[in-house]
């Protein structure tokens, strides 16, 4: 995760940055307390959750990075696999954004931003000492060429609960440099005129820049270490907010009013805003088309007069095209320093009023638009302007703005006190806030949103047509389906609450024929209402039993997701699922080496050995081991190797080596060839030495 993932008018300006001003307290608005709301789990097994989109009938599309697109169906409680999209997976690539067409009730178009497989090199398990899937850090253009790829925005027809991959219409492709981390994710949204907005990351490796701006211009260096080629390049679609109009049969046109007029030399007319690092989440105001966008920060914990300011997350209300400065400036008064990576010598701070891109990797204009200031800028410590944001890591997510509908009869809709307030989620700090804006879109007040309700690494948020807030949570962990990952709905309670179901199965696996005792033990209704039970043993949408604790025999092997739906006397319902593999057992994956807590130094090559226990012959070529940089509860996957043995070189970054907020995470995974196939995984976390 994704990460998820330049400046200074004067050197004295950095010193001022390091000296916090007196904190300004902002009085809280009277929003309803958390006790007036209820969080209802919709899917406890969402894969590695990335994005969601709520359909007009309250079904919920949600994606997993590895290619799965699922649909939560509230009428039955099922979570149906709508499609499995073949994707290229290395570091953060995979399925990213999902959205539905503004005219979805009539055309059924679903938009997805994903990484097509192409012919990009992958690791060969027969050569454990070499990882062919990692792009070289140094070399020539010919060495880097095989790793040129794209992120693709396409749309597909949704028929029932099936996303028909054969209906794909390609809309736009964004270049990427593959085989190296980071920042490829994209969010999709539409304005009131049907224009499509897409956010793109800077596709730049940040880990050799000491937490400051990656401006490495050395001739033999992989261009992926220079964000000037993307975010600071007027002729490149990366590190941008794009605004286009999807064509009737695919493709797109460019509406009027973007940052550069069509035909302007060395520019791309699709660009609406530029100078963005990792604008992972944004949304549009439903009443004004203002874009509420959050941008991830680089990682320096403190300012350095020779390099620039510390890392700062940003939130902006974009009401006109603009340049937001990356990789030259955080804000008009917060420039980075022009640092020479070849000599290690610092030059002058960049001029944020008239930034110049003189990188040899730049294909666009040399002189860039002046830097626009974000409405919210905050760092790791207490913000002098906005102490309400707290302290900790920096993981800003631009959330939705609520529009209250007095005519709606939905029992779940949020109250009018939230009307017009854009939400802001902090991925590393596990909270959601509400921003109050004046007529100039300046933030005047920040309020906590349901502080007693858990938001466990909130990944994506959207208000549904029922006025409830839908939340996709990543949970604590790295690039897998974490135990706390889920899709949930948060309702405003009017009268009765929704029942809370629990479902279990005994035994939890085995060969067919398999007789299973199901149990609803632990199911409760907060109001004490009588409950009706509906079990769907094979998740086909039909009720198989209305007993609280039924027995069922599975006669055919398969990976089943039996569903228990419970309904109270007022008609409120919720569901719970059981993951039930019938057939071959799941493989048991174990790391022989490295071991948990093993010390290491960044830059060290770590040898690994993985064992797999299975009830079928083990094919080591099917073992994958991913190295992830763990950082402030999230991680950046940097390399993936294949085979039961091999080696992975951890990255070198003098600005981070030994920092207490970093770890090295190794995740091994194996999918067998049983009927049906089963997957097992193991994770070890290493400890960096000082």
Image: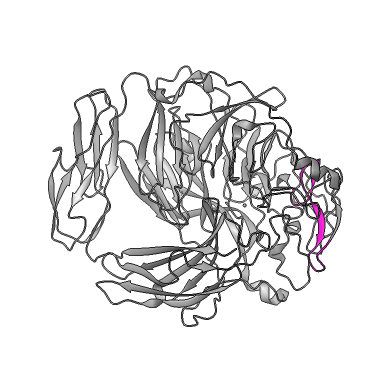
Q: Can residue 88 be seen?
A: no
Horizontal arrangement in the rendering, residue 519 relative to residue 207 (left or right) = left
- Closest to the observer: 10 or 7? 10
Horizontal arrangement in the rendering, residue 6 relative to residue 591 (left or right) = right
Spot occupied by residue 192 in the image (x, y as percentages of width and height): 61, 32
Within the image, what quadrant is residue 509 found in?
bottom left
What number of labels is visible?
0
Q: Is residue 67 above or below residue 351?
A: below
The residue lying at 48 percent from left, 17 percent from top is: 406
Spot occupied by residue 75 in the image (x, y as percentages of width and height): 30, 36
- Closest to the observer: 342 or 218? 342
Residue 327 forms part of the magenta stretch: yes
- Closest to the observer: 381 or 259? 381
The residue lying at 50 percent from left, 42 percent from top is: 460
The residue lying at 25 percent from left, 28 percent from top is: 525
Spot occupied by residue 427 in the image (x, y as percentages of width and height): 53, 43
Quadrant in the picture for the C terminus: bottom right
Part of the protein shown in magenta: 326-345
Residue 160 forms part of the magenta stretch: no
Q: Is residue 341 above or below residue 515?
A: below
Q: Can residue 347 be seen?
A: yes
Within the image, what quadrant is residue 344 found in?
bottom right
Spot occupied by residue 365 in the image (x, y as percentages of width and height): 83, 54
Horizontal arrangement in the rendering, residue 543 relative to residue 262 (left or right) = left
Colouring scheme, one of rainbow, by chain, secondary structure, one colour: one colour
């Amino acid at each position: 995760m994704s990460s998820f993932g330049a400046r200074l008018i004067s050197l004295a300006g950095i010193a001022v940055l390091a000296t916090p001003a007196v904190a300004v307290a902002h009085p809280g608005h009277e929003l309803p307390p958390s006790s007036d709301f209820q969080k209802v789990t919709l899917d406890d097994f969402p894969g590695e959750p990335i994005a969601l989109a709520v359909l007009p009938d309250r079904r919920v599309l949600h994606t997993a990075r590895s290619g799965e697109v699922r649909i939560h169906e509230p009428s039955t409680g099922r979570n149906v696999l709508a499609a499995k999209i073949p994707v290229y997976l290395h570091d953060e690539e995979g399925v990213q954004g999902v959205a539905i067409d503004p005219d979805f009730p009539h055309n059924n178009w679903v938009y997805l931003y994903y990484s097509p497989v192409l012919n990009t090199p992958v690791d060969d398990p027969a050569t454990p000492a070499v990882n062919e899937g990692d792009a070289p850090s140094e070399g020539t253009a010919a060495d880097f060429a095989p790793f040129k790829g794209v992120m693709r925005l396409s749309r597909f027809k949704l028929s029932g609960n099936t996303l028909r991959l054969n209906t794909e219409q390609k809309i736009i492709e964004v270049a990427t440099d593959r085989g190296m981390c980071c920042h490829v994710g994209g969010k999709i949204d539409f304005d009131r005129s049907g224009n499509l907005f897409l956010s793109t990351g800077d596709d730049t490796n940040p880990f050799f820049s000491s937490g400051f701006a990656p401006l490495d211009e050395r001739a033999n260096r992989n261009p992926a270490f220079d964000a000037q080629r993307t975010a600071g390049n007027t002729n490149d679609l990366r590190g941008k907010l794009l605004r286009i109009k999807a064509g009737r049969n695919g493709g797109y046109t460019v509406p009027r009013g973007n940052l550069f007029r069509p035909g302007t030399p060395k520019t791309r007319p699709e660009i609406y805003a530029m100078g963005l690092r990792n604008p992972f989440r944004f949304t549009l105001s439903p009443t004004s088309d203002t874009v509420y966008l959050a941008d991830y920060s680089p990682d320096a914990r403190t300012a350095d007069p020779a390099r620039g300011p510390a890392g700062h997350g940003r939130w902006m209300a974009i009401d006109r095209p603009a340049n937001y400065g990356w990789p030259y400036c955080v804000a008009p008064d917060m420039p980075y320093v022009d640092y020479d990576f070849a000599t290690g010598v610092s030059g002058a701070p960049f001029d944020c009023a008239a930034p110049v891109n003189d990188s040899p990797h730049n294909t666009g204009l040399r002189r860039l638009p002046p830097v626009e200031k974000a409405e919210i800028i905050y760092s790791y410590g207490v913000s002098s302007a906005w102490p309400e944001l707290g302290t900790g890591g920096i993981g800003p997510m631009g959330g939705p703005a609520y529009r209250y509908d007095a005519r709606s009869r939905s029992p779940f809709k949020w109250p009018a006190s939230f009307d017009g307030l854009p939400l802001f989620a902090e991925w590393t700090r596990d909270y959601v806030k509400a921003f109050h804006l004046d007529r100039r879109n300046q933030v005047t007040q920040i309020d906590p949103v349901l502080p007693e309700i858990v938001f466990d690494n909130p990944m994506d948020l959207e208000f549904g047509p029922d006025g409830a807030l839908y939340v996709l949570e990543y949970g604590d962990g790295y690039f897998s389906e974490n135990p706390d990952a889920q899709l949930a709905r948060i309702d405003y309670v009017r009268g009765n609450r929704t029942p809370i179901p629990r479902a279990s199965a005994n035994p939890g696996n085995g060969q067919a024929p398999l007789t299973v005792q199901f149990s609803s033990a632990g199911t409760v209704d907060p109001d004490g209402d009588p409950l009706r039970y509906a079990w769907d043993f094979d998740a086909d949408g039909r009720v198989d039993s209305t007993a609280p604790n039924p027995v069922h025999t599975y006669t055919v092997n398969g990976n089943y997701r039996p569903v228990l739906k419970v309904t109270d006397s007022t008609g409120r319902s919720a569901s719970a699922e059981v993951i039930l593999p019938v057939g071959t057992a799941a493989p048991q994956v174990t790391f022989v080496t490295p071991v948990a807590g093993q010390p290491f130094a960044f830059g060290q090559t770590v040898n690994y050995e993985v064992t797999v226990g299975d009830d079928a012959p083990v094919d080591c070529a099917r073992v994958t081991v991913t190295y992830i940089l763990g950082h402030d509860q999230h991680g950046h996957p940097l390399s993936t190797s294949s085979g039961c043995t091999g080696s992975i070189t951890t990255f070198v970054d003098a600005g981070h080596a030994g920092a207490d907020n970093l770890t090295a995470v190794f995740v091994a995974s194996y999918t067998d060839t049983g009927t049906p196939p089963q997957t097992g995984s193991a994770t070890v976390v290493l400890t960096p030495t000082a």
